[in-house]
Amino acid sequence: MKGFFETLRNIYKIEDLRNRILATLGLILIYRLGSYVVLPGVDPVILEDLNRNSSGGGLAGLLNMFAGGAFSRASIFALGIMPYISASIVIQLLGVAIPYFQRMQKEGESGRRKINQITRLLTVVITFGQAPGYIATQVPDAAIIGGPSFFFTISSVIILTTGTLFVMWLGEKITDKGIGNGISLLIMIGIISSLPFAFAAEFAKRLEEQGGGMVMFLVEMVFLLLVIVVTILLVQGTRRVPVQFAKRVVGNKQYGGVRQYIPLKVNAAGVMPIIFAQAIMFVPMTFASFSDSNALQGVMAALTDFQGFWYNAIFFIMIILFTYFYTAITVNPSNMAEEMKRNGGFIPGVKPGRQTAEFLDTIMSRITLPGSMFLGMVAILPAFAMLGGVNSQFAQFYGGTSLLIMVGVVLDTLQQVESHLLMRHYDGLMKSGRIKGRSSLNMATQ
């Protein structure tokens, strides 16, 4: 405990780090306050009563968790940062298929600014497309003061779009003036905002007569801790490939001749396979909802049972497939081999060029299989938690997208804090070892 307070004092002594942390907390506070500001023309009391009677699950429940409850409250930040995430994914995929975006990715800082500007413009387009659908499906007519109207729809679309752009601006400001990745932090804050309520509900449930008492609650906490440890191992796991750089003598100085490592991540795709799989799982449900066929209704029932065998089996298989797909489009062994060859680097025992690319591709194929299976297991753990008697809200923190995002963002933020401490010749956050965030491991996705 003494070392913990000493670390806090060291953080406070560093003016730049202190100001960054305070700026981050201030911008997060603005985001949380804005998530409670309801759209003009919506009665929050009626909306809350209607939401209380709805299931709140499925894709809407997932989006509501990412938005920190703003989605269900019809807030001005209801769409949150998700349109920006969608635009970023589209631009990233276009960078694989279209030469124009590939050239911009290789242009360095100027190319990055162009890509960011295109991403922002695409965010506006996506938000304008999503906002009318949100108003039509998530804002009941009974909650609209004076009833639905064309003016209400237009004004709400403009406000929702502006709210998303403001949240995007907050995330960029946190990245520039604060600590950590701003967009990731805002998503994490939205997810973690429901943790205290879920924790309290689970605690109260276990204290009931048939709840199992404190013993069962402590068992759940121990199991949750083990899941977090396994998730950290999944996020941090790498296969280090040694790279030797040839010696070069320029004048009286010698360059190169050192050995470094390429950290190939076991889970290079991050949480994207889970997001893709969840989106695909909702497609047959959407089609089945428009049909009266008993067979399709049976399919919909199977795919909406989050504790059922078929839902979790299909979900698990799709995560494995999407992990391979997303890893293939984000990790390019040919480019890595070309960069090594250009800088005079080579893998010991492997010829530069095509054989190096094949060697790296073989390693990625081998480590992606266990990584994808572990990712699939983490994704379906909430279903096992619910089968074990954990309430649905608290079970979401036993795995899935929420736990992976929280672990990754926390590690990334702590790694940046530690780098500030070490740069000023202070001890790190731990007496032994160093925290490795996603940025330190060249994670392909944020």
Image (cartoon, rainbow, N blue to C red):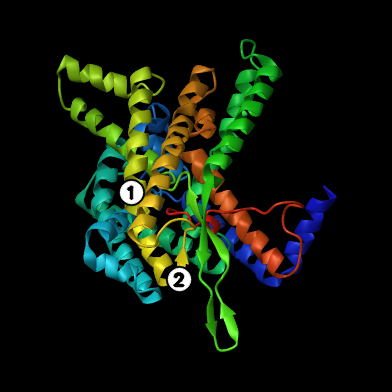
16 relative position to 139: left or right:
right
**Front in this rendered view, residue 49 or 118:** 118
**Front in this rendered view, residue 420 or 335:** 335
Local secondary structure at mark 2: loop
N-terminal of the pair, mark 2 or mark 1, is: 1
All told, the count of numbered labels is 2
Q: Tell me the number on the disc at residue 136.
A: none
* Other residues around mark 1 within 10 Å, as few (<14) / some (14–19) / many (≥20): some
Alpha-carbon span between mark 2 and mark 1? 25 Å
138 relative position to 367: left or right:
left
Q: Residue 93 appears in which quarter of the rendering?
A: bottom left
* Residue drawn where x is 55% and y is 73% of the image: 256
**Residue picked out by circle 2:** 344
State the image coordinates of residue 377 (x, y, percent, origin top left): 46, 30
Q: Amino acid at mark 2?
A: Gly
- Which numbered disc, 2 or 1, marks the residue closer to the eye? 2
Q: Amino acid at mark 1?
A: Ala
Local secondary structure at mark 1: helix
State the image coordinates of residue 117 (x, y, percent, origin top left): 33, 69
**Residue picked out by circle 1:** 328
